[in-house]
Image (cartoon, helix red, strand yellow):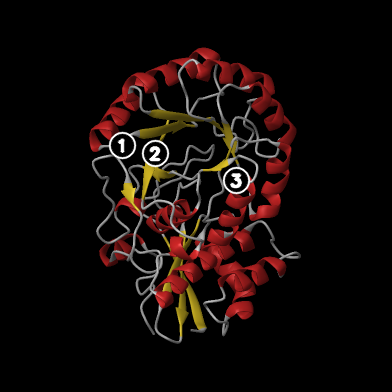
Amino acid sequence: MHITRIETCGLRGATPEGGWSNELRPDDVVHTLVAVHTDTGHVGIGSAFTAEGLVRAALELLRPLIIGGNALEVERLTETLHQSAFWMGRGGTLTHATSAVDIALWDLAGQALGQPVGRLLGGRYRDRVRPYASVLMDEAAAMTDNLRALVDEGFTAFKIGWWKFGRVDQATDERTVAAARAAVGDRLLAVDAGGSEAFFPGNLSWAKRTADMLAGYDVAWFEEALAPDDVDGFVALRAHSKVPISGGEVLTRRQAFAPYIEAGAFDIVQPDTTKGGGLSESRRIGWAAQDRGIRLVPHGWNTGIGLAADLQLASALAATDLVEYKTGSAYIDELIAGSWSLDGDGLLTVPDAPGLGVVLDSTALQRYGTNPSFAEAA
């Protein structure tokens, strides 16, 4: 099974808000699908959390390194891409594009071998995973209505984040958390400060005070409490906090996570498989974290393909029993044929079909994709 071509498809028309300073608009393309075609007619699909123009530019450099390669040699091919990127975009656009290629190659390997990707990643510890409904913070009334509706849908875990948190005053922070806790009852609730927003004002003193407040609301973890590069700050915060500390969603490659893991900066690491290097890198990060008693809970503000990859990853890591579910996103709810459904326990079944175990919905792809013929066999 040899690689013959690679194509891209950006998603636009229903891009959800991200909570960023320069807020996303529906037609902004920040998620890009990648299809890897082979001489056997198999097509693997991946997803990158980055603009299609950047993915296309990256593939201009990367394509010669993998066209003609054996699609079953997943980690050799993607490690070749990482090793060849030292001088042009390593850790940035080239790594983001490599993430999608890696996911697509695992999809192909699973199809070829008739196995779900999770089994190829080392074996399935679980066949169901709890999704946590991930929502942006808002004024108490609007956020409460949203969270209660999600409770009614069957979600049993939640995360609220960004908005004004850490950006106005302590009263606003606590009022927001109190409203969320009241809305979800005793179900899992995590809080994300969004420290990767440009010029995030939160500092270590603020983070310590806030961690103390969050402990009173039985918060499951405190995410991105500081700017992403503040290793020492995270170490100090974790030593102080009674609430587990998490982060890492903007870090790329296992080498970037190593200093945080070795320093004990996080209780939970959160690589984004669609930008950090793909399933190959997320698995290695998860293994390194597990050796030090640290959990991996993937960041997943992405697409249905990204969610499928996260579910396969979660099935193959002993301590990863949660995945992020960006609620209200057409790119997750509509992009996959058959969509997603919670079972009676509020869990998602890990797809058991070969590869990622999912198929793109052609109608949704026509509606939201920039490439009408994407992933068609040649």
Horizontal arrangement in the rendering, residue 326 relative to residue 197 (left or right): left
User: SS of the residue at dot 2?
Assistant: strand
The type of residue carrying mark 2 is: Tyr
In the image, what residue occupies the spot 69% across and 61% down? 89
Which residue occupies 40% across, 27% down? 138
Q: Which mark is residue 155?
A: 1
Residue 308: image location, x then y, percent? 40, 57
Q: CA distance from mark 3 to mark 1?
A: 27 Å
On residue 290, the disc is: 3
Q: Are marks 3 and 1 in contact (CB under 8 Å)?
A: no
Label 1 sits on a secondary structure element that is loop
In the image shown, does 333 or 131 lie closer to the viewer?
131
The answer to whether mark 3 and mark 2 are in CB contact below 8 A is no
Where is residue 56? Give x, y as percent: 55, 68
Instruction: Name the image quarter holding residue 152.
Output: top left
Task: Give the image location of residue 179, x and y in percent.
Answer: 38, 19
Residue indicated by mark 2: 132
Instruction: Indicate which disc, 3 or 1, sits on the residue closer to the N terminus.
Output: 1
Tell me: 212 left or right of 9.
Answer: right
Pinpoint residue 322: horizontal percent, then vertical percent.
43, 42
Residue type, label 3: Gln
Mark 2 vs 1: CB contact within 8 A: yes
